């Protein structure tokens, strides 16, 4: 079955092979026969990998980038080197630009933009029937093919809908004479994941009208779909580039690295992780185990950037130094202050003062530039002809500004040159500072376009420096990263702030800028993934548990004392359904490998059942919870579906391994004349932590202490999902 949208896991279903005889084995648990595994899994095991490919994604608010490196047997033990880390380029529709030497170069970052053409969508995307999955289902039906709530019937159809991404959106905007009614351009949708910070509310509000329109037309269900649609295109291009470089071979294993903001809560990381894994599946990029991506590594954007800066110049960052990292992106500018705990490899402490955010990134410079041009041209209605409008003309000029003059000028200087804006058919007007086909912008106007963003960044830096002084931390270095970080205007403004500042020891504070700010996070993420030692302690920020149907025991389990039980129709006994048994609690320390005490579960079926299908579900939460309460109880507020497995145990009946059972002495059917018999299936449900993955398995048979000839226990079905988002970024 396919991945459940919005969940963190896919499950595989297979029928077990011949049941082993009554003989003892030294093996604890065996998988059901290997030839039932998907081809890609069994083939991966048979051919040992000669090369390992690490791919890191920096999904930015306005621009994204992908970096990669290869590791073979000979280089695996060598110290990490930045020189071997490359970036994906040659993005579709990117206009190559010439450098100072007249050589053409291709951008290594790509706009984080989408464009859905609603005019080409008659009825929107088809949605599946909204049938929720339920736990503890013991179904005797011959088929069980209902889809989880809200899942689209065919993910592959998504690629056939009219969709532009990256530079393709900007190329379309340059076509001033093309009607754009019925189209929806989406920018800065990464902010939709940052719901807990009030500072980003304005940015989210600006996206909502388009977001709601797409939801209404059933083009998307939630923000995860937007991220998945974008990342799918990014990964398809990445895959094509790597194939062109002959780096993707049959025996190449792939490790994916995701960088996330330091200020994101674990839920935002989980949503991002889920969208990324689904995009990887749809694009065919990645190494899969148990039908899901294996051991995803997550790193914080500031730590990745700092690792890259240190690798570029080994003499610039020292142990015990205090550093401020300014991440100047398109939507927000974030500032975080750390203590350097190690330099070989670089490791940072937790934040030593509260982090700060300003919603004044580079995209707001574009908005002010757009407003300036709209105001200047609002009366030039004669320009609106042949399909062109004032708005479409200005939109095209904003794209030119974004990729040109905005990246070059320094508005902090007293004097700086400005290019006149070419407007086809613009009539000369001296009072308006128009010449034929040209519009002049003054230095004062351009300073106003930049000022709010520069001031926001400067205020943010000053705030971090003051907080550090107040806590007696002497800041030695400020590292400027992010796409906006390559702006000469921003570098000059922050440099001016530091020129007038001294740390608590009276020393100067140095501004460090990476050689290529737009890809510093992606390159640093790969560099960090090459050496995961000495990372944060493996403390989970999430709780995980199984959804269960438990025997009704009000005198022994307090959670059962005030609930109404239900009578099972098959065995007539009393149960409390849809409770959650939490095996992992938030703030638990998880070893790299640990197996939790198995839970014995029982599923009952009427005697006439032809199939014995058992469904088990896993739930996740950002809180701590007591076990045995129903999912709907207030105690379990915040619990969310994480994944499920579906075990076909019909073979037990067909092979005579279980027999029809009469009602027990506790059954409400007991004492009746001709009481109904039923099928009873028992197996162990086991949760296993394996690195940054969580396995959960159905094992049969249940070991009995009085068994003289115990059977080998086999794993009848196994689910897996990544729990990387549950750990502090950088956890190995």
Image: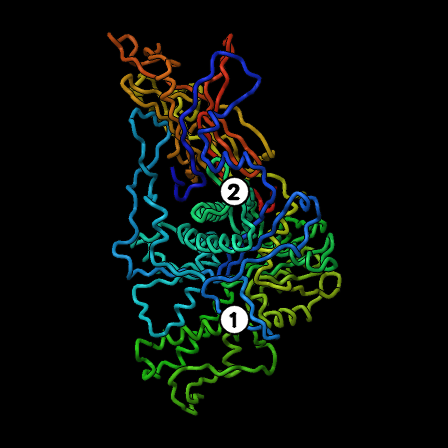
Q: CA distance from mark 2 to mark 1?
A: 45 Å
Q: Residues within 10 Å of mark 2 (few under 14, many from 20)?
A: many
- Left or right: 113 as drawn, with respect to 727: left
Residue picked out by circle 2: 287
Residue 420: horizontal and vertical position, in percent?
Answer: 48, 83
Residue picked out by circle 1: 452
Pick the residue in front: 635 or 650.
Answer: 650
Contact, mark 2 vs mark 1 (Cβ under 8 Å): no
Q: Which residue in the rendered view is the most extreme toward the left?
A: 673
Pick the residue in front: 527 or 17.
Answer: 17
Q: Residues within 10 Å of mark 1 (few under 14, many from 20)?
A: some
- Residue 271: tell me if it is visible: no
| Position of the C terminus by quadrant | top right
Callout 2: SS = loop
- Residue 167: tell me if it is visible: yes
Q: Earlier in the sequence, mark 2 or mark 1?
A: 2
- Left or right: 9 as drawn, with respect to 315: left
């Amino acid at each position: 079955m396919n991945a459940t949208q919005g969940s963190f896991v896919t499950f595989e279903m297979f029928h077990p092979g011949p049941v082993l005889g009554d003989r003892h084995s030294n093996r604890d648990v065996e998988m059901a026969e290997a030839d039932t595994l998907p081809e890609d899994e069994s083939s991966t095991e048979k051919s040992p990998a000669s090369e390992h490919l690490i791919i890191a994604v920096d999904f930015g608010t306005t621009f994204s980038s992908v970096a990669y490196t290869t590791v073979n047997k000979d280089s695996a033990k060598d110290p990490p080197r930045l020189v071997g880390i490359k970036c994906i380029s040659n993005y579709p529709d990117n206009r190559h630009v010439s450098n100072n030497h007249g050589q053409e170069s291709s951008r290594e970052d790509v706009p984080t933009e989408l464009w859905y053409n609603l005019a080409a969508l008659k009825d929107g995307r088809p949605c599946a029937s909204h049938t929720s999955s339920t736990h503890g289902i013991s179904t005797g039906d011959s088929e069980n093919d209902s889809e989880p709530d809200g899942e689209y019937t065919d993910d592959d159809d998504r690629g056939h809908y009219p969709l532009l991404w990256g530079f393709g959106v900007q190329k379309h905007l340059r076509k001033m004479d093309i009607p754009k009614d019925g189209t929806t351009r989406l920018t800065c949708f990464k902010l939709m994941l940052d719901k807990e910070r009030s500072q980003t509310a304005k940015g989210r509000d600006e996206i909502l009208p388009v977001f709601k329109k797409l939801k209404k037309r059933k083009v998307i269900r939630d923000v995860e779909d937007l991220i998945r649609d974008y990342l799918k295109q990014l990964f398809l291009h990445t895959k094509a580039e790597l194939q062109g470089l002959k780096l993707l071979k049959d025996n190449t294993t792939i490790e994916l690295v995701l960088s996330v903001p330091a200020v994101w809560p674990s839920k935002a990381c989980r949503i991002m992780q889920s969208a990324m894994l689904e995009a990887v599946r749809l694009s065919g990029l990645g190494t899969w185990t148990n039908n899901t991506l294996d051991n995803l590594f997550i790193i914080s954007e500031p730590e990745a950037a700092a690792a890259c800066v240190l690798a570029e110049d080994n003499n610039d960052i020292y142990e015990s130094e205090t550093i401020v990292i300014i991440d100047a992106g398109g939507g927000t500018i974030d500032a975080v202050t750390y203590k350097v705990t190690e330099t070989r490899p670089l490791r940072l402490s937790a934040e030593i003062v509260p982090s700060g955010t300003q919603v004044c990134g580079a995209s707001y410079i574009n908005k002010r530039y757009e407003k300036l041009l709209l105001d200047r041209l609002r009366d030039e209605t004669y320009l609106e002809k042949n399909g062109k409008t004032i708005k479409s003309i200005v939109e095209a000029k904003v794209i030119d500004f974004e990729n040109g003059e905005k990246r070059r000028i320094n508005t902090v200087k007293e004097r700086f040159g400005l290019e006149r804006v070419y407007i086809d058919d613009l009539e000369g007007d001296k009072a308006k500072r128009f010449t034929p086909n040209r519009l002049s912008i003054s230095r004062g106007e351009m300073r106003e376009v930049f000022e709010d963003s520069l001031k926001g960044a400067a205020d943010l830096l000053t705030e971090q420096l003051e907080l550090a002084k107040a806590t007696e931390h002497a800041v030695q270095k400020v590292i400027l990263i992010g796409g906006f970080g390559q702006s000469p205007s921003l570098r000059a403004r922050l440099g001016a702030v530091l020129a007038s500042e001294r740390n608590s020891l009276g020393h100067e504070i140095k501004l460090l800028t990476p050689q290529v700010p737009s890809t510093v996070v992606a390159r640093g993420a790969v560099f960090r993934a090459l050496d995961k030692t000495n990372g944060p302690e493996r403390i989970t920020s999430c709780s995980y548990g199984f959804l269960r149907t438990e025997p009704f025991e009000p005198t022994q389990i307090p959670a059962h004392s005030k609930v109404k039980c239900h009578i099972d129709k098959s065995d007539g006994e009393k149960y409390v359904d849809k409770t959650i048994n939490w095996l992992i609690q938030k703030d638990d320390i998880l070893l790299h490998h640990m197996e939790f005490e198995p839970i014995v579960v029982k599923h009952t079926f009427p005697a006439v059942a032809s199939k014995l299908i058992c469904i088990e579900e896993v739930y996740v939460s950002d809180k701590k919870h007591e076990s045995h309460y129903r999912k709907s109880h207030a105690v379990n507020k915040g619990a969310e579906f994480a994944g499920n497995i579906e075990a076909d145990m019909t073979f037990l009946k067909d092979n005579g391994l279980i027999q029809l059972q009469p009602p027990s002495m506790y059954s409400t059917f007991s004492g009746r004349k001709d009481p109904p018999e039923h099928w009873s299936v028992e197996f162990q449900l086991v949760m296993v932590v394996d690195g940054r993955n969580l396995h959960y398995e159905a094992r049969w048979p249940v070991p009995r202490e009085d068994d003289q000839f115990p059977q080998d226990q086999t794993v009848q079905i196994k689910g897996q999902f990544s729990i990387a988002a549950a750990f502090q970024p950088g956890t190995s």
